Amino acid sequence: MITIDISGFGGGYEIACQLMLCQAVKWLEEHPQADPKFHGFKGATGILMEDNADADSLSSATTREVPGGPTGAMHQAVICHALIIRQYGRECWMKKLHHRAIEIPFDTPESMRDWINQKDHRNPEGAIQWPHAEKGDYAR
């Protein structure tokens, strides 16, 4: 699947971001009248606060599939990308960010979720290993 690199980190971290993006876009499509409102702090990455019930619901739908929960930076980046997709469309999002296009070895959110939840993709500390990484090359 061709998508836009959200995190820049690769590995399991990026796959979790991609799964979260699928969930966020799906929620937004299923709730076209929703008006999620968020706020953050200038110069602070990873702090995104929900200001209404729609934002709470979107955040819950976006983050519930990530084992152990996402980082604040993951949450903020994914929500921002999802809201851009909602406003301008996926085609425009892909076109504007074409320089960050990546191909991931998954076709559906279900295949990402299945891979994330397989224990054999984790090292002893629980970090998720990238599907095509060399043995011992782990991404947190």
Image (spheres, helix red, strand yellow):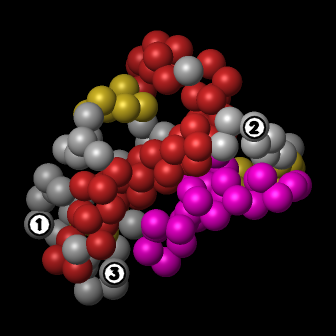
State which region is magenta: 51-79
Q: Is residue 69 above or below residue 57?
A: below
The structure residue drawn at horizontal position 87% and vertical position 55%, both measured from the top left corner, is 52
Q: Quadrant of residue 58?
A: bottom right
Residue extending furthest toward the bottom: 124
**Residue 100 is inside the magenta segment:** no
Q: Helix, strand, or loop for circle 1?
A: loop
The residue indicated by pointer 2 is 33
The residue indicated by pointer 3 is 126
Q: Residues within 10 Å of mark 1 (few under 14, many from 20)?
A: few
Sequence-wise first label, 1 or 3:
3
Q: CA distance from mark 1 to mark 3?
A: 15 Å
Q: In screen coordinates, is 84 left or right of 18?
A: right
Q: Quadrant of residue 128?
A: bottom left
Image quarter hosting the N terminus: top left
Q: Residues within 10 Å of mark 3 (few under 14, many from 20)?
A: some
Q: Is residue 19 above or below residue 115?
A: above
Q: Helix, strand, or loop for circle 2?
A: loop
The residue indicated by pointer 1 is 135
Q: In screen coordinates, is 34 left or right of 27?
A: right
Amino acid type, callout 1: Lys
Amino acid type, callout 3: Gly
Q: Helix, strand, or loop for circle 3?
A: loop
Q: CA distance from mark 2 to mark 1?
A: 47 Å
